[in-house]
Image (spheres, rainbow, N blue to C red):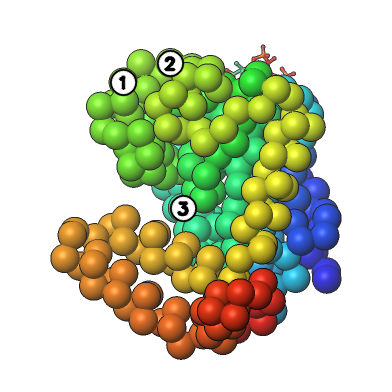
């Protein structure tokens, strides 16, 4: 599979898993315009794979052991006017929406600083794993700015509005352990190799399940996040019904009754 070539991303397929590494370690992997363009192009390639996905999940990480992504590129932003800033924000919003729309899970493997736009990029992944040296924060107020890549929405959904307010108003940096305690991070690993192994192991566990059901669950959970109770329940029953129309569910149900291990066709 040709995943494309990128100036600031490394894209490597390892069996069932696509490992995407933001690769600008000299600037702590900050989201320069080139990185945003590369993420846009890569998510475009991924979004084009409507069916027959060659991988069962994506791991997103940063190059080196110091930083996942240290945020928007402050050097580039230093000369930005409001119109350019709006375009920058909207472009990253589109990247994050594309990540959320992929039919396979995306795990953020946070291997160091996840600050500002870096924390926001991680929040657009399905969930976040971290190495013990990782740290998280929305430090925009220290620059006279506010979150611009989705943090105002996704951080409060992930950790609750009170905690999101405190993190955004103070710009405070928190450790991986604290991020785990407040539910921003699902699990913390001793070091970066253990972090990547942990992400791969979880994707392997998911890969043993029905592909159409995982994609359906991801779509439903994302759209239900925007809905109230009754509309959310409607959406759930729609996706529940859809699952019953798949070959995967037929195979899964029949295998249970026959006391066999299902082999899902992915349809
Ligand atoms: N943009 C551009 N360059 C950055 C960067 C960023 N966000 N973060 C770090 N760098 C660069 C530094 O300028 C430095 O480059 P030089 O070697 O050329 O001087 C290099 O990366 C290494 O950084 P430091 O020397 O600062 O490393 P450190 O270990 O002393 O500090 C740090 C690490 C605490 C993360 C510090 O670099 C820092 O505070 N970075 C900025 C973090 C931040 O504020 N991020 C939010 C940006 S705003 C945003 O993201 C808005 C939004 O919501 C979209």
Q: Which quadrant is the N terminus positioned in? A: bottom right
Please provide percent x and percent y for residue 109.
65, 38
Tell me the element at label 1.
Answer: helix
Q: Which residue is mark 3?
A: 93
Tell which tag, 2 or 3, sits nearer the viewer.
Answer: 2
Q: Position of residue 171 (x, y in %)?
A: 41, 19
Quarter assignment of residue 194: top right
**Rendered view: 33 above or below 216:** above
Q: Is mark 3 within 8 Å of ligand 1?
A: no
- For residue 132, which quarter of the picture? top right
Name the secondary structure under disc 3. Answer: helix
Residue 47 visible to the viewer:
no
User: Which label was assigned to residue 166?
Assistant: 1
Residue sitting at x 37%, y 75%:
240
Mark sitting on residue 81: none
Residue 153 relative to residue 16: left or right = left
**Residue assigned mark 2:** 172
Is the distance from the Cβ of mark 1 to the nearest ligand 1 atom less than 8 Å? Answer: no
Callout 1 touching callout 2 (CB < 8 Å)? yes
Q: Which quarter of the rendered image does ligand 1 occupy?
A: top right
């Amino acid at each position: 599979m040709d995943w494309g070539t990128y100036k600031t991303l490394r894209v490597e397929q390892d069996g069932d898993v696509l490992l995407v590494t933001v690769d600008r370690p000299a600037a702590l992997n900050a989201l320069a315009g080139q990185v945003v363009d590369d993420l846009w192009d890569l998510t475009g390639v991924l979004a084009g794979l409507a069916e027959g996905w060659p991988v069962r999940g994506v791991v997103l990480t940063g190059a080196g052991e110091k930083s996942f992504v240290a945020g928007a590129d402050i050097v580039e932003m230093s000369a930005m006017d409001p119109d350019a800033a709006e375009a920058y924000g909207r472009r990253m919003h589109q990247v994050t929406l594309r990540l959320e729309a992929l039919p396979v899970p995306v795990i953020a493997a946070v291997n160091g600083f996840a600050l500002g736009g870096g924390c926001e990029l991680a929040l657009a992944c399905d969930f976040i794993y971290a190495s013990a040296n990782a740290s998280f924060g929305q430090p925009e107020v220290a620059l006279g700015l506010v979150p611009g890549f989705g943090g105002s929405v996704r951080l409060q959904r992930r950790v609750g509005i009170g905690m999101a307010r405190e993190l955004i108003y103070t710009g405070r940096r928190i450790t991986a352990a604290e991020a785990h305690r407040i539910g921003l991070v699902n699990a913390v690993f001793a070091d970066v190799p253990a972090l990547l192994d942990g992400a791969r192991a979880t994707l392997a566990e998911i890969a043993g399940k029905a592909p159409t059901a995982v994609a359906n669950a991801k779509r439903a959970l994302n759209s239900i996040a925007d809905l109230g109770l009754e509309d959310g329940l409607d959406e759930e029953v729609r996706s529940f019904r859809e699952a019953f129309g798949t070959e995967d569910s037929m195979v899964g149900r029949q295998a249970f009754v026959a006391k066999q291990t299902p082999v899902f066709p992915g349809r």
